[in-house]
Image (cartoon, grey):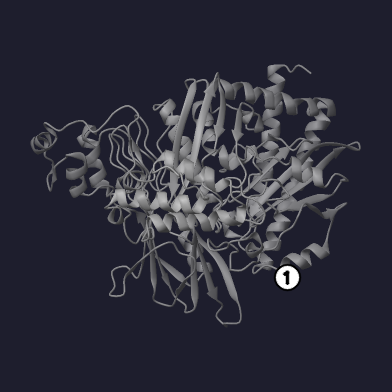
């Protein structure tokens, strides 16, 4: 059916409005703060093949448009009016779900006995059981530790909620009342979607509604390809690192080769490190998962905000995603903190895009999204509650002509903060500081965004602080074209006291009344030579408390006194200085430079190729032995620098060659 452009636009707006109302209903009806305040949820409308064609334009998490419901719907084929399907199983859903706290629901919408589409909803639940409160711990090494698993199944049959499901779910989680409140909010949202879809069909007809689903997707596909044509044809390689996997101190590398040809984008993740024995894996089933297209979503919507929000945007994107890597986890790999590798692979994709077109995208954001969870005893001591205190964020990266955004990071999602009053009302704590972190943004002609700073004071003994997403303690968010990296992550227990202690990655931190924990979020990278920044802009940053006078002088060559800007001194500081860089020069910081002086791209690709030829059970232990033999004292991220233990590169390379020959049974292993 050929659509009149006016009718297509009318139906697009009606479908988007229906999704928007589903979104508002779920958020207003939910019980948990993480939904009501932070907005960690999603809704949409998919066709019978499981492809999204309707998405709420007002929602803060837009990358979920790429969700693929096909595998889940295929496993529950016999649906009737009033049925609702639920799953939180990453492996059986083939990457629709990516960790167990995310519960997905789908409801078929019928018209005269025929399925018109499915409404869907997802909420991140605060706790779904498992080894630790909140269900998420970086030290989990298999999915069975991460909570109760629901394969794709009906929980509502002909409008009747299964009491067996309710009993099993509430018995196996630590927040049963809140969780069931959120389940009911999801069901209410799906019913609103049904009503609105039926109204559209009644007005425009069933056949028109079915046909518009493909028409909208095709329309978005054509427009998205036009945007991708902004990227010159070619191959662009890039890689980036997570600090480590907590279990070891070995960095995790994410490699992408982005091939662009006439608006088609192919991403090859071959060379990415093997899956780790921790919760930093992404279950993608080898497909073009939404964790792998997130930065492309930003690119598309930045250059064409008029795109209709649906999965058609990704039709010209393909992937090579080999099994067994961090980006293609295999059962029963743990996946709870899949957001950390998700952020880093999208930073690698950012690098590839900037290589292709340095003026078309901002440099990476801070690279860490820390969600602080408090587990505390009740006043009676008979039970414990699990509360998400705050999703703490860093800054966004700078771009040509524009500073990064301070204290916000919407490159992944635009989640909101929890108001301090609500946090303090719900938990036995006080927020002592909530500010921007001075000097954290990467210096540049356009400055990187500042990270947040938050200090939490505990008011009750026996608490546990858990935080997921601690990253960029070792490798900061990098800068481009002379721009400098942002400042790394830092966390401090009892800052400013005699018992002050800097923390490495936190699994479970036990705290008592009077303890404080301070999180200093990393800043984002800068763009362009900082000595070319307008001195008045530097003065403004100093006056606003974003940049210190010391940094204004050392990083920007700007002298600021008690009376204001000293123009003559600034000219002297800047005079005769060589330009910092241009084009697509990257500044990764000293830690990555020291690491790659030994573990370069060719070496790591060789190691990973040999590791992937081994049985899965042998890969991680072999990898650990290789690096520990080559570098016996790799420091923990946040504790010491890599550069401090890499003072004899030749000796490290010799030991690495020996370890590779021993591990792979190859006496002719080349020296690296």
For mark 1, what is the residue? 171
- Toward the viewer: 314 or 81? 314
Quadrant occupied by the C terminus: top left
**Res 379 quadrant in image:** bottom right
Seen at 77% across and 37% down, the residue is 197
Asked whether the viewer can see residue 242, the reply is yes
Measured as percent of width and height from the top left, residue 201 is found at: 81, 31
Quadrant occupied by the N terminus: top right
**Res 632 quadrant in image:** bottom left
- Toward the viewer: 206 or 663? 663
Residue 29 left/right relative to 613? right
Q: Within 10 Å of the Cα at label 1, are there few (<14), some (14-19), or many (20+) other Cα atoms?
A: few
Asked whether the viewer can see residue 411, the reply is no
Measured as percent of width and height from the top left, residue 549 is found at: 18, 48
Give the number of callouts. Answer: 1
Measured as percent of width and height from the top left, residue 571 is found at: 11, 33
Residue 551 left/right relative to 510? left
- Toward the viewer: 443 or 146? 146
Measured as percent of width and height from the top left, residue 490 is found at: 36, 58
Seen at 62% across and 61% down, the residue is 142
- Toward the viewer: 131 or 191? 131
């Amino acid at each position: 059916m050929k659509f009149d452009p006016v009718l297509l636009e009318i139906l697009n707006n009606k479908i988007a409005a229906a999704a928007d109302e589903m979104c508002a209903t779920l958020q207003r009806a939910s019980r948990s703060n993480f939904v009501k305040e932070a907005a960690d949820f999603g809704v949409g409308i998919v066709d019978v093949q499981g492809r999204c064609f309707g998405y709420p334009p007002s929602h803060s998490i837009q990358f979920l448009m790429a969700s693929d419901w096909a595998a889940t719907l295929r496993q529950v084929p016999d649906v009737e009016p009033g049925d609702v399907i639920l799953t939180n199983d990453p492996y059986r859903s083939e990457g629709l779900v990516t960790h167990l706290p995310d519960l997905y629901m789908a409801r078929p919408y019928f018209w005269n006995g025929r399925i018109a589409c499915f409404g869907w909803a997802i909420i991140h639940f605060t706790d779904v059981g498992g080894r630790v409160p909140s269900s998420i711990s970086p030290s989990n090494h298999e999915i069975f530790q991460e909570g109760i698993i629901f394969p794709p199944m009906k929980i509502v049959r002909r409008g009747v909620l299964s009491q067996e499901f309710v009993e099993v779910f509430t018995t196996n989680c630590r927040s049963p009342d809140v969780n069931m409140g959120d389940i009911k909010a999801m069901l209410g949202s799906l019913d609103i979607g049904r009503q609105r879809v039926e109204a559209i069909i009644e007005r425009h007809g069933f056949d028109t509604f079915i046909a518009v689903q493909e028409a909208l997707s095709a329309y978005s596909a054509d427009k998205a390809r036009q945007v991708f044509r902004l990227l010159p044809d070619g191959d662009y390689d890039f890689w980036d690192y997570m600090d480590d996997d907590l279990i070891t101190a070995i960095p995790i590398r994410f490699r992408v080769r982005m091939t662009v040809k006439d608006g088609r984008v192919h991403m090859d993740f071959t060379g990415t490190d093997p899956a780790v024995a921790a919760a930093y894996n992404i279950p993608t089933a080898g497909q073009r998962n939404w964790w792998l297209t997130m930065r492309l979503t930003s690119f598309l919507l930045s250059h064409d905000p008029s795109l209709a929000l649906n999965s058609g945007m990704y039709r010209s994107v393909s992937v090579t995603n080999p099994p067994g890597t961090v980006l293609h986890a295999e059962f029963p790999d743990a996946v709870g903190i899949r957001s950390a590798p998700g952020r880093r692979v999208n930073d690698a994709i950012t690098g590839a895009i900037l290589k292709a077109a340095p003026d078309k995208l901002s440099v990476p954001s801070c690279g860490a999204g820390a969600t602080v969870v408090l587990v505390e005893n009740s006043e009676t001591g008979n039970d414990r509650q699990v509360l998400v205190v705050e999703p703490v964020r860093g800054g966004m990266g700078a771009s040509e002509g524009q500073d990064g955004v301070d204290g916000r990071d919407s490159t992944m999602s635009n989640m909101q903060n929890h108001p301090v009053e609500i946090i303090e009302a719900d938990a036995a704590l006080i927020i002592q500081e909530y500010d921007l972190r001075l000097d954290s943004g990467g210096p540049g002609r356009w400055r990187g965004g500042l990270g947040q700073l938050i200090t939490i004071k505990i008011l009750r003994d026996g608490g546990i602080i858990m935080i997921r997403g601690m990253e960029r303690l070792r490798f900061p968010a990098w800068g481009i074209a002379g721009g400098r990296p942002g400042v790394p992550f830092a966390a401090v227990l009892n800052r400013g006291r005699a018992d002050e202690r800097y923390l490495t990655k936190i699994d479970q931190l036990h705290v008592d009344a009077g303890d404080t924990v301070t999180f200093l979020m990393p800043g984002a990278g800068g763009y362009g030579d900082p000595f070319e920044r307008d001195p008045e802009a530097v003065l403004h940053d100093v006056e606003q408390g974003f940049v210190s006078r010391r940094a204004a002088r050392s990083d920007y060559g700007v002298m600021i006194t008690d009376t204001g800007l000293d123009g003559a001194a600034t000219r002297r500081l800047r005079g005769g200085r060589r330009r910092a860089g241009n084009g697509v020069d990257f500044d990764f910081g000293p830690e990555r430079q020291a690491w790659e002086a030994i573990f370069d791209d060719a070496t790591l690709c060789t190691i990973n190729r040999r590791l992937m030829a081994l049985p899965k059970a042998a890969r991680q232990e072999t990898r650990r032995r290789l690096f520990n033999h080559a570098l016996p004292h790799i420091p923990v991220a946040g504790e010491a620098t890599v550069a401090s233990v890499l003072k004899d590169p030749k000796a490290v390379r010799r030991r690495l060659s020996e370890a590779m020959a021993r591990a792979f049974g190859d006496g002719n292993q080349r020296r690296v």
